[in-house]
Amino acid sequence: MEDNIALAEGMNQIWNWLCGVCGWRGVAQDLATDDNTEEWWVCPKCNSTNIQDIGWHKGNKKHYE
Ligand SMILES: [Zn+2]
């Protein structure tokens, strides 16, 4: 998990979803959908269902509004 976060270092986007497979980060609107999965929502990069909402981040830091 920490390795995945480190991959995107320098990125200053606000995000809350993290893919545990490829390290993709983004917001719910960016997620892809797959009717063949139970979860329906999948990573837009690698189509994995191993995605989770880990709370808002800005870049690599926790972000509080
Ligand atoms: Zn992914």
Image: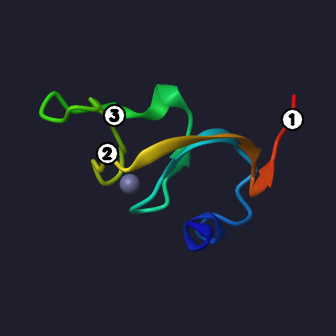
Q: How far apart are the alpha carbons under marks 1 and 3?
A: 26 Å
Considering depth in this image, is 60 or 38 the residue closer to the camera? 38
- Judging by the rendered image, the residue that carries numbered circle 2 is 49
Left or right of residue 11, residue 40 in this image: left
Amino acid on which the number 1 mark rests in the picture: Tyr
Q: Position of residue 53 (x, y in %)?
A: 56, 38
Q: Position of residue 16 (x, y in %)?
A: 63, 39
Structure colour scheme: rainbow
Left or right of residue 22, residue 33 in this image: left
Element assignment for label 2: loop
Query: In this view, which residue lies farthest toward the right?
Result: 65
Q: Earlier in the sequence, mark 2 or mark 1?
A: 2
Graded by Cα atoms within 10 Å as few (under 14), some (14 to 19) or many (20 or more), the crowding at tag 1 reads few
Element assignment for label 1: loop
Amino acid on which the number 3 mark rests in the picture: Ala
- Tell me the number on the disc at residue 5: none
Q: How far apart are the alpha carbons under marks 3 and 2?
A: 10 Å
- Tell me the number on the disc at residue 32: 3
- Judging by the rendered image, the residue that carries numbered circle 1 is 64
Q: Position of residue 14 (x, y in %)?
A: 71, 39
Query: In this view, which residue lies farthest toward the left?
Result: 36
Q: Nearer the viewer, mark 1 or mark 3?
A: 1
Q: Quadrant of residue 37?
A: top left
Amino acid on which the number 2 mark rests in the picture: Thr
Is 13 drawn above or below residue 11 in the view shown? Answer: above
Q: Quadrant of residue 36?
A: top left
